[in-house]
Image: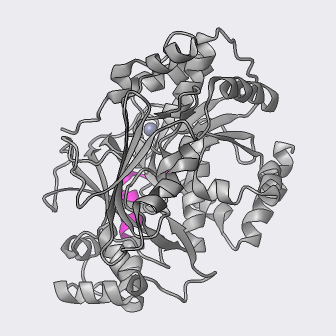
């Protein structure tokens, strides 16, 4: 589809049919990014006050919480009210979901679940307003790199939402809004060749995907000596996991365009995005980001847990939501001129690939999603040994005796194929790694071993890289 038609007709129509004011919000965000930092802070406080008043009045959970702290969002300064509230965890949301939601949200409530590699499944609700603001923030970040609304975008992705609805209708819609999807869950070498063919045929303005998957694709192109013919490509957008420096270099060198990192999640929103100067700007109009150490605010520059309040989540407010990621706020202003504050994400999600004996490489999420979807799973871990065998450990939710080893194996088997020995253990507890974070998929099979078995090109990824743990300060 012509970008001009997509931009001016199809995209706006699509958003309007869904009842989302995405383009109005985009115009707002295009202006507010240039405000002085003090004005951004004022805008943020105004929105925070409205959200806190709404949450106190219309949700039982936050109403009770605010009452218990003695804070009154109608009169007290909003930041003060916010800081008196205890942070909210995934477990809190799971336990109090009904009391957290506002059924009267304009446009209705839309159930969603957590993306990313969290081992604990989480169901939550979105409304049209926050969907539109999250989308507008995403479109704005694309424009920072000269990628306009409606230009072609090629995804290397594997989210369950994108796949489960990947029927003909969805494909047609993607075609109309100039999106095309390649699976990050199936990356055998011959498939990577086909992906590069598709990239040359489609000529997208940007690529979007997990940094590890895009680095794998770039490495494949480089090691097979393939020179990429690209005419329109202007940026590669990575998200969903920590982007290691070596992956960033690999992607940039092969595709020959800037790599920009985005930080966010399905439940917490579009939290921050890198600008062309290489700095990560908060989407300060849509989220308040706090850094906490022992639940107390950390000083600017100090590392701690990233806790997020989404300013446009009205159907289900996310107020002081624990992301489980680690980062810091940064002082100073970016040379790009935007007044949006800066942050670093030091430690976030990190995953390994799974390897199959036939050379297929699967993104960790390909096994995380079916396990997470199993009823009764509280927590899990996937360990792949050097001989390709896989152990899945599962902690059951209390009162779910129906979940047995066979059910877990049945969920994992389609991902692993028939040649991989699979053992399932029901365990009482899964310990955190030395960094304090859970690693949901760990694979001892190095790319080198896989390459040797297959007599492929030299290993594109060093074993040390695959086994690398992101450590937090
Ligand atoms: Zn900047």
Residue 46 screen position, x and y as percent: 39, 72
The residue sitting at 35% across, 55% down in the picture is 380
Q: Nearer the viewer, residue 19 or 220?
A: 220
Residue 432 screen position, x and y as percent: 22, 49
**Which image quadrant is residue 120 in?**
bottom left
Residue 277 screen position, x and y as percent: 45, 31
Q: How is the image coloured?
A: one colour
Q: Nearer the viewer, residue 144 or 10?
A: 10
Q: Is residue 244 magenta?
A: no
In the picture shown, does residue 390 fall above or below 405? above
In the picture shown, does residue 13 fall above or below 64? above
**Which image quadrant is residue 25 in?**
bottom right
Res 115 visible: no
Quadrant in which the N terminus is drawn: top right
Quarter of the image where ligand 1 sits? top left
Image side of residue 388 versus residue 359, left or right: left
In the picture shown, does residue 317 fall above or below 140? below
Q: Is residue 42 magenta?
A: yes
The residue sitting at 27% across, 58% down in the picture is 427
Quadrant in which the C terminus is drawn: top left
Please identify the dominant SS of the magenta region: helix
Res 263 visible: yes
| Chain part drawn in magenta | 32-46
The residue sitting at 40% across, 82% down in the picture is 100
Residue 209 screen position, x and y as percent: 57, 39
């Amino acid at each position: 589809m012509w970008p001009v038609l997509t931009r001016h007709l199809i995209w706006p129509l699509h958003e309007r049919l869904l009842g989302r004011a995405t383009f109005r919000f985009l115009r707002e965000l295009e202006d507010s990014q240039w405000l002085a930092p003090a004005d951004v802070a004022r805008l943020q406080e105004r929105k925070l006050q409205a959200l806190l008043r709404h949450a106190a009045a219309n949700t039982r959970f936050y109403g009770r919480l605010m009452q218990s702290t003695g804070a009154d969002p109608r009169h007290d300064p909003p930041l003060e009210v916010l800081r008196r509230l205890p942070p909210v965890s995934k477990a809190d949301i799971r336990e109090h979901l009904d009391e957290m939601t506002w059924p009267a949200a304009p446009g209705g409530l839309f159930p969603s679940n957590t993306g990313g590699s969290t081992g604990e499944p989480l169901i939550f609700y979105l409304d049209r307003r926050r969907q539109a603001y999250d989308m507008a923030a995403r479109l704005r970040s694309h424009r920072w790199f000269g990628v306009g609304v409606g230009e072609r975008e090629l995804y290397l992705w594997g989210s369950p939402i994108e796949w489960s609805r990947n029927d003909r209708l969805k494909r047609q819609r993607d075609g109309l809004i100039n999106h095309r999807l390649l699976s990050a869950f199936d990356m055998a070498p011959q498939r990577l060749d086909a992906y590069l063919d598709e990239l040359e045929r489609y000529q997208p303005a940007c690529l979007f995907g997990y940094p590890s998957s895009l680095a794998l694709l770039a490495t494949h192109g480089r090691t097979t000596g393939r020179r990429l013919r690209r005419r329109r490509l202007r940026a590669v957008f990575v998200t969903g996991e920590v982007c290691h420096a070596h992956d960033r270099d690999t992607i940039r060198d092969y595709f020959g365009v800037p790599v920009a990192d985005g930080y966010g999640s399905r439940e917490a929103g579009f939290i921050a995005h890198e600008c062309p100067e290489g700095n990560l700007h908060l989407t300060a109009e849509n989220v308040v980001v706090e850094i906490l150490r022992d639940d107390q605010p950390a000083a600017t520059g100090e590392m701690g847990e990233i806790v997020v309040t989404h300013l446009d989540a009205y159907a289900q407010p996310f107020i002081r939501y624990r992301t489980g990621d680690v980062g810091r706020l940064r002082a100073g202003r970016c040379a790009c001129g935007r007044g949006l504050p800066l942050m670093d994400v030091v430690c976030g999600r990190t995953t390994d690939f799974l390897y199959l004996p036939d050379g297929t490489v699967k993104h960790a999420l390909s096994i995380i999603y079916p396990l997470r979807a199993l009823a009764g799973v509280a927590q899990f871990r996937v360990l792949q040994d050097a001989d390709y065998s896989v152990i899945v450990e599962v902690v059951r939710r209390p009162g779910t005796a129906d979940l047995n080893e066979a059910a877990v194996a049945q969920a994992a088997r389609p991902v692993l194929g028939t040649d991989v020995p699979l053992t399932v253990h029901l365990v009482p507890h899964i310990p955190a790694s030395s960094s304090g974070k859970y690693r949901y998929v760990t694979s001892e099979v190095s790319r080198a071993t896989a390459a040797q078995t297959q007599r492929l090109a030299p290993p594109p990824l060093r074993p040390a890289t695959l086994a690398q743990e992101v450590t937090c300060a």
